[in-house]
């Protein structure tokens, strides 16, 4: 029996080591070692770029490959692939740099480096795709430290696959001996899931103008935070030469709490947040950059050259893993008035010693101000410095038309209905308008018990149902955007047929009434309008009359009022903030062709204040037209076949996203009614979406927030849908027994938890919802099953052999018997060890099963899908063979 126990223990240990070997990082480093090169002997760095120190942890050495910069202020870049395909976490950084030679280092994460060379001049860029700063080191600045339990998520389906190191060599006099440099950083990575995930929040000004000679110019940024709680631990500031001080704050209940304050002329690095700061839902993140235009003879704008400026405040944060978002931006100022209360410290420049200024800007002692060639060289150095800024700061593209949103937009997402949203069940009239107030609450404009039908107007557009009186219900309701709880309501006995709605920066409601042919401005708590445009119940086409006006928009910068007029006029009218007529543009569409500036029902307006443009949903022409705010000059058209013949509404989100909804298709046409997400610069459709509950009938208005929460109001369904952004699911196809199985993964959950715990329903909609809920296939779960199987099988085989031996030789006992048993077991173990000689190669089996690539497979269509992962659910995976989206119900109109 002792021999049996001994053999069993040996067998278990052997198979445990085999199985654990498959999970060890060393087992997946072969691919990395095949393509990586060891550091030259003259470098002091390790010649093993990947070093394992445990079953799940390893170190990745990222070093310059023995370079010798020839000129001061040289910027060199190099890239290193993540050595594993699986998801990993960066939990610590160890810099390797000498202050005598290296000015600063930046480490980026991305999926496509700008070059495939061993190293390259950073003038070529760092990454071709969007890059995130993970680490910054600078002379005379503290290194970046991650709190315990916090990690940057890399690899897997959504994380970065490459690290790009950028090193700025300041004074190269230390290289006179022509020695080789291997400066860099060593990363500590782990496969152990971290409870807290690190991310980056970028606040940046996009429209600041600095007048020449002006002593003080403020650039203010502020956004409402609408996500799960995050905790801040480091910050970084950045401007060009005119920046004096940059400060960041959390504003909660009117109280300003400092996140960080620093001179942008000090070394570029992430500085630790002095006191812990947490950000909760509905807090405001605010930042101010103070500039001086002294010494300039022309206006200075935001941009990427040495003569432009930038205003950036970076925040490193961590969140709970299940809610983690890796990157967020804020590019607007939602509440300019609150900056009157900003702490005075934000307006006081921090003193910087002249020698530090020279160090930061690459100026050296031998540079003479009187030497013209030195000054030219100095300007060249400044532009090289700004080239580094271009690579690390996406905001410089905001001044370059079609490139601006390409870097800011994180297009790796899709839109899905939030099925737990109870707003769909509200008892509303015809929903005609939607907007978000400054607090990001949802404002709904509906018609109560009034309807717009064929009896509402005569042939001259005069309203025929005045005898009904105004609507006796509150027509404007304000809802909590999370739970649809009623917060406020107004608008009783004021309107006959509500239509368009917008909310200005001060929270005033601007609405149109197609029956009254008027536009109104109402305070949130006022019973009577603050401003009225148009003559009640009188349609017209002059400066004082409207004819069924459809929408209104207010410029947050100038206060100018823009009205789309309307169903029986084809024009856009501009008014001053006080309601005085300024100008108009537009005309009726010509027969057979719709040219620029021609409308067939200008139905909805979207202001793009960043670019001073106004976009119009030209409904019956099925397109979007955009114009310059100042002149009404046509700038562009966005039109797609997928729109069909009608495009009802359009909404813009700062940062470059355009949202729209179309109308029901005409008989015989294929284009279905849906929502669209577009890149504003290119006009291309990024995503489409449809609801899961009910179907769109006549979606009449759409509004979206900066975090890509979308609301759609339907005039026929009398409903408001809520949709949310989810990181786009990657999928891989696996052929198995002739059936193609699609596996999906996503980083956010919206609805699955509510549906998973319900018993199976016969309701086809619920069944469809359940069918779409496909979870992430967990590598840990698969590995556990395989390991368990591999451990059980040999035990069973051994027991069978023991029984067989005992049956054959029941009289063998003592030392002889034990020896024979050991011999038999030894032969078995020998065969198992000989896995390279024609037996089963378990290593290859694991590799082929677990590490198959998604390359070469089609991306799973996101249109109409509802594939979500419940992070609280213990189920490892749920596979979907075929899932079709709900077909839209035919419209009644």
Image (cartoon, rainbow, N blue to C red):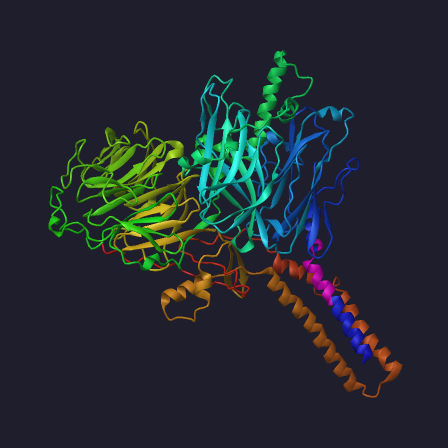
Quarter of the image holding residue 118?
A: top right
Residue furthest bottom in the image? 811
Q: Between 211 and 687, which is closer to the camera in this rendering? A: 211
Question: Is 328 placed left or right of 459 in the picture?
Answer: right
The percent coordinates of residue 201 (x first, y second) are: 52, 42
Q: What residue span does the magenta drawing correspond to?
A: 15-26
The percent coordinates of residue 65 (x first, y second) are: 71, 36
The percent coordinates of residue 425 (x first, y second) are: 32, 60
**Residue at 74 percent of width and 53 percent of height:** 53
**Residue at 77 percent of width and 69 percent of height:** 831
User: What secondary structure prevails in the magenta region?
Assistant: helix
Quarter of the image holding residue 576?
A: top left
Question: Is 180 placed left or right of 413 in the picture?
Answer: right
Q: Between 159 and 464, which is closer to the camera in this rendering? A: 464
Q: Is residue 664 above or below residue 356?
A: below
Residue 261 appears in the rendering: yes
The percent coordinates of residue 631 (x first, y second) are: 30, 27
Q: Is residue 773 above or below residue 684?
A: below
- In the rendered image, the quadrant that contains the N terminus is bottom right
**Residue 331 part of the magenta-drawn span:** no
Residue furthest right in the image? 815
Quarter of the image holding residue 891?
A: bottom left
Total residue callouts: 0
**Residue 21 part of the magenta-drawn span:** yes
Residue 642 appears in the rendering: no
Question: Is 282 placed left or right of 148 in the picture?
Answer: left
């Amino acid at each position: 029996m002792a021999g049996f126990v001994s053999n069993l223990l040996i067998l278990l240990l052997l198979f445990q080591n085999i199985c654990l070997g498959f999970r060890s990082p060393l087992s997946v480093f072969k691919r990395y070692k095949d393509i990586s090169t060891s550091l030259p002997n003259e470098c002091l760095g390790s010649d093993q770029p990947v070093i394992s120190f445990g079953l799940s942890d390893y170190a990745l050495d990222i070093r310059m490959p023995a370079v010798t910069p020839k000129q001061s202020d040289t910027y060199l870049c190099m890239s290193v692939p993540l050595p594993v395909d699986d998801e990993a976490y960066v939990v610590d950084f160890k810099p390797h740099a000498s202050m005598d030679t290296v000015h600063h280092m930046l480490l980026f994460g991305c999926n496509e480096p700008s070059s495939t060379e061993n190293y390259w001049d950073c003038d070529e860029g760092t990454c071709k795709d969007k890059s995130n700063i993970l680490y910054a080191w600078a002379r005379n600045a503290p290194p970046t430290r991650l709190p315990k339990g916090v990690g940057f998520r890399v690899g897997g389906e959504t994380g970065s696959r490459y690290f790009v190191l950028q090193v700025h060599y300041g004074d190269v006099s230390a290289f006179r001996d022509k020695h080789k440099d291997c400066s860099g950083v060593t990363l500590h990575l782990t496969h152990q899931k971290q409870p807290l995930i690190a991310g980056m929040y970028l606040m940046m000004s996009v429209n600041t103008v600095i007048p020449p000679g002006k002593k003080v110019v403020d650039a203010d940024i502020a956004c409402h935070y609408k996500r799960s709680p995050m905790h801040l631990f480091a910050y970084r500031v950045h401007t060009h030469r005119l920046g004096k001080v940059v400060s960041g704050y959390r504003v909660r209940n009117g109280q300003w709490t400092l996140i960080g304050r620093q001179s942008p002329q000090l070394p570029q690095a992430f500085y630790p947040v002095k006191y812990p700061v947490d950000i909760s839902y509905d807090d405001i993140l605010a930042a101010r950059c103070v500039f001086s235009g002294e010494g300039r003879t022309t206006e200075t704008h935001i941009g990427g050259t040495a003569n432009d400026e930038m205003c950036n405040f970076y925040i490193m944060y961590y969140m709970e893993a299940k809610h983690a978002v890796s990157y967020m931006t804020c590019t607007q100022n939602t509440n300019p008035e609150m900056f009157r209360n900003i702490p005075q410290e934000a307006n006081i420049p921090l003193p910087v010693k002249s020698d530090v200024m020279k160090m930061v800007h690459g100026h050296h002692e031998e540079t003479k101000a009187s030497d013209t060639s030195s000054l030219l060289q100095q300007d060249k150095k400044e532009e090289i410095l700004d080239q580094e800024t271009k690579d690390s700061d996406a905001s410089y593209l905001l001044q370059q038309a079609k490139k601006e949103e390409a870097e800011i937009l994180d297009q790796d997402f899709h839109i899905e209905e939030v099925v737990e949203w109870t707003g769909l069940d509200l008892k509303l009239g015809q929903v005609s308008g939607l907007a978000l107030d400054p607090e990001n609450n949802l404002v709904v404009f509906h018609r109560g018990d009034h309807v717009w039908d064929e009896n509402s107007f005569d042939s001259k557009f005069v309203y025929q149902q005045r005898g009904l009186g105004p609507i006796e219900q509150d027509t404007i309701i304000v809802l909590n955007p999370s739970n649809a709880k009623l917060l406020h309501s107004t608008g009783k006995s004021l309107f006959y047929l509500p239509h368009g709605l917008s909310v200005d920066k001060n929270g005033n409601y601007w609405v149109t009434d197609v029956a009254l042919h008027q536009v109104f401005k109402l305070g949130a708590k006022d019973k009577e309008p603050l401003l009225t445009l148009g003559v009640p119940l009188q349609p017209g086409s002059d400066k004082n009359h409207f004819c069924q006006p459809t929408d209104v928009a207010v410029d947050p910068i100038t206060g100018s009022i823009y009205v789309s007029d309307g169903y029986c006029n084809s024009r856009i009218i501009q008014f001053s903030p006080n309601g005085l007529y300024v100008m108009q543009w537009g005309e009726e569409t010509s027969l057979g062709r719709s040219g620029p500036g021609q409308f067939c029902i200008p139905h909805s307006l979207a202001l793009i204040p960043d670019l001073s443009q106004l976009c119009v949903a030209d409904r019956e022409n099925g397109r979007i037209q955009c114009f310059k705010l100042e002149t009404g000059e046509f700038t562009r058209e966005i039109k797609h076949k997928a729109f069909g013949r009608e495009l009802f509404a359009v909404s813009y989100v700062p940062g470059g996203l355009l949202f729209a909804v179309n109308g029901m298709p005409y008989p015989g046409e294929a284009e279905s009614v849906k929502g669209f997400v577009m890149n504003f610069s290119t006009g291309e459709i990024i995503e489409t979406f449809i609801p899961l509950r009910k179907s769109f009938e006549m979606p009449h208005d759409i509004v979206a927030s900066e975090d890509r929460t979308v609301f759609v109001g339907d005039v026929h369904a009398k409903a408001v849908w809520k949709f949310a952004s989810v990181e786009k699911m990657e999928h891989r196809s696996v052929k198995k027994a002739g059936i193609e199985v699609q596996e999906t993964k996503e980083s956010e959950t919206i609805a699955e938890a509510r549906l998973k715990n319900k018993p199976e329903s016969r309701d086809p909609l619920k069944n469809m919802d359940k069918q779409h809920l496909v979870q992430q296939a967990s590598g840990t779960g698969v590995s556990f099953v395989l390991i368990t199987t591999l451990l059980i099988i040999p035990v069973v085989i051994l027991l069978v052999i023991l029984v067989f031996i005992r049956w054959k030789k029941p009289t063998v006992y003592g030392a002889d018997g034990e020896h024979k048993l050991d011999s038999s077991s030894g032969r078995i173990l020998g065969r198992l060890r000989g896995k390279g000689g024609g037996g089963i190669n378990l290593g290859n089996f694991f590799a082929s099963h677990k590490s198959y690539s998604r390359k070469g497979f089609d991306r799973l269509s996101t249109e109409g899908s509802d594939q979500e992962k419940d992070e609280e659910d213990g189920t490892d995976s749920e596979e979907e063979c075929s899932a079709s989206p709900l077909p839209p119900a035919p419209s009644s109109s």
